[in-house]
Image (cartoon, coloured by chain):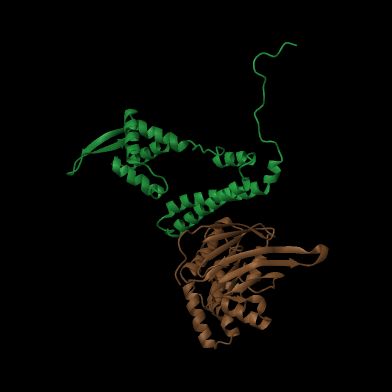
Amino acid sequence: MSIVETKELTKVYGSGDTALTALNHVSIHIQAGEFVAIMGPSGCGKSTLLHLVGGLDRATSGGVMIEGHNLSDLNDTRLAELRRRKIGFVFQFFNLIPVLNALENAALPLLLDGVPLKAAQKKAAEWLDRVGLSDRHTHRPSQLSGGQQQRVAIARALVSEPAIILADEPTGNLDTHAADEIVGLLRQVSSQWGRAVVMVTHDPRIAAYADRIIFLKDGVMVNETRLEAGALPAQ
Amino acid sequence: MSVRHAILGLLAQKPRHGYELRSAFEALIGGEQNWEVKPAQIYTTLSRLEESGLVAEAAIEQDGGPEKHIFDITPAGREELGDWFEGAVEEVHQRDEFYLKLMLSINDEFADPYAVIHVQRSSLFRDLHGLTTQRQALNGMENLAQILLLDKAVMHLEADLRWLDMVEGRLDEIRSHPPPEPETRPRGRPKKS
């Protein structure tokens, strides 16, 4: 079963003469443990697709299924819960909370989900260690490099053990070297830790790390290229 | 030719026999998957260099197996190598098979230039995927030389992919122009009026 599936997914902003179709009948399947890049020129609908898959926005028509749950069947409370437990987000500008240190930032999703502080921090510490920040637990975002801040954000995305990681231009604010490290880490998130990773990027070099690239243009999926011929990693 | 100069450069480091030269070349280029040189090519090049007086046999080694002819660079070879270091390497930028294919597909009713672009883009992305995988496996401290070579290939692929996007964006515009044709000149004598 696909872990993410979109069926004829369509998003129209506005109405009447000013209506803008951002996404036009897009159907995709993503398997567990797969690393997929979404590419296309700006305005092609790639961020819209990511937001709809992440339940951050509602579709105009068509649907998103996450592990068999149709997002349009969920009310706002249930949708927020599914987002917290099944999906981890990584953003271009890291979106860390400046007054919290790395450990506190990474533990935050668990605390919001009602996990006791000790248990949440233990889990956060484990994930910070796994993403290579074992000696940076007590550093605040301002004391970390861009690449390190994005590592904290990836630990935060993984801390609730979601099945899916959605990354919106995760290397867009990093230099070449840090960008390679971060996309390499995302590849590890899928190949070693079995999460489905869906990444939006406009950078061909970064997209080439993925198993598959989906090309969008004017809201329509125009092409698809498989880069990794081998079977998907075992769960 | 580059293999010829590589052999001169490797012999300038120390005298070697043919088999050693091939292994040294392979180590330098980061493995035969990057640039395969057959043993025959090494031996043919060596004997041509010897005929031109740029290398000379320095010794014959025998350790049970067949004889190994060890070669050394001559002063004339050293001079030739110096010229190579001082000059620029000529690169071919405009001899492009894909360009030919695309242009001919535009005016062929049985071909789809958009599909031609898509197939090429997929292939370039697969190459890029292979290179980034290879690069990630290398250690920045130990394999710096190979990383530099991989980075060059990566940068070229990035440029090729950008260029494809540009061509795709302007394909309809290119299609609306007549294809390039040779200038027609009347043959033979002009007709008498």
Reply above or below: B38 against A1: above
Residue A235 locus on image (x, y percent): 46, 72
A181 and B59: which one is in front? A181
State the residue at coordinates (50%, 56%): B129
Question: Is A42 left, or right, of B138 in this rendering?
Answer: right
The answer to whether residue B54 of the structure is visible from this angle is no
Residue A99 locus on image (x, y percent): 62, 79
Image quadrant occupied by the N terminus of chain B: top left
The answer to whether residue B109 of the structure is visible from this angle is yes
Residue farthest to the bottom? Answer: A116
Residue B143 locus on image (x, y percent): 41, 55
State the residue at coordinates (44%, 38%): B85
Reply above or below: B76 against A177: above
Question: Is B65 left, or right, of A126 in this rendering?
Answer: left
Q: Please tell me in which quadrant of the rendered image residue A220 appears.
A: bottom right
- Find chain B in the image and tell me its colour: green
Residue farthest to the right? Answer: A17
Q: Please tell me in which quadrant of the rendered image residue A114 appears.
A: bottom right
State the residue at coordinates (49%, 83%): A122
Reply above or below: B169 against A97: above
Chain that is coloured brown in the picture: A
A180 and A63: which one is in front? A63
Image quadrant occupied by the C terminus of chain B: top right
State the residue at coordinates (45%, 53%): B147
Residue B95 locus on image (x, y percent): 55, 37
Residue farthest to the top? Answer: B192
